[in-house]
Image: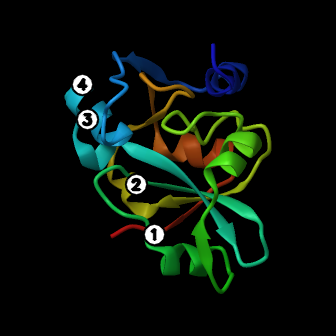
Amino acid sequence: MTPAIKQLTSENITFALHQYSHEANASSYGLEVVEKLGLNAEQVYKTLVVCTDANQLAVAIVPVNKKLNLKNIAKALKTKKVKMAEAKRVVTVTGYILGGVSPLGQKKALKTVMDSSANNFEQIYISGGRRGLEISISANDLASLCHAIFADISN
């Protein structure tokens, strides 16, 4: 049981688990999820970690078939600039390996911004905290658990 699943269970949130066999040579973890589980790419979200110009980390939750718009997330975070966080720092702060970073159950709670497109779906899919494990959950439940704000942060 991952920290993400533990958090969902302890909060009595409705969710479902979806497992697949992860391929070590997959070129994109997110698109592998779409292919292996037969999902709509617009409904599967990746968890990215950014670093602000004040050296603070924050989480961005965006569709796997889109790119994170750094200017838009900086604006949502009310900072001038952001860049992608260093991989080693992401692992240390979240407690998850790359390709398995969940917005839930992280070691340290980070400011979180969800792409507003998540509101288009009854359920979205996010990492369950390891490669090969996805969670389906309502965007509003996820936002509530992460204290996330919604903003247009992908393109």
Residue 89 at x, y = what percent? 71, 50
Q: CA distance from mark 2 to mark 3?
A: 19 Å
Q: CA distance from mark 4 to mark 3?
A: 6 Å
Viewer-nearest of discs 1 and 2: 1
Residue name at image x 59 percent, y 49 percent: 143
Q: Label 1 near label 3: C-beta < 8 Å?
A: no
Q: Amino acid at mark 1?
A: Ile
Asked whether, in this view, residue 108 is left or right of residue 118, the answer is right
- Residue 116: horizontal and vertical position, in percent? 43, 62
Q: Label 1 near label 4: C-beta < 8 Å? A: no
Q: Which element is circle 4 on?
A: helix
Q: CA distance from mark 1 to mark 2?
A: 13 Å
| First in residue order: circle 2 vs circle 3 | 3
Q: Position of residue 35 (x, y in %)?
A: 21, 31
Mark 3 or mark 1, which has the lower sequence index? 3
Residue 80 is situated, as x and y percent measured from the top left of the image, at 65, 86
Instruction: Name the element at disc 3.
Output: helix
Residue under the point 28% across and 40% down: 31
Tell me the CA gap for discs 3 and 1: 21 Å
Task: State how far apart marks 4 and 1 are (Cα).
Answer: 26 Å
Q: Which residue is mark 2?
A: 119
Q: Mark 4 sits on what residue?
A: 36
Q: Is residue 10 above or below residue 46?
A: above
Q: Secondary structure at mark 1?
A: loop
Residue at image coords 61%, 50%: 87
Can you identify the residue that label 3 sits on?
Answer: 34
Q: Amino acid at mark 2?
A: Asn
Tell me the kind of residue under disc 4: Lys
**Labels in figure, total:** 4
Instruction: Look at label 3 and name its amino acid.
Output: Val
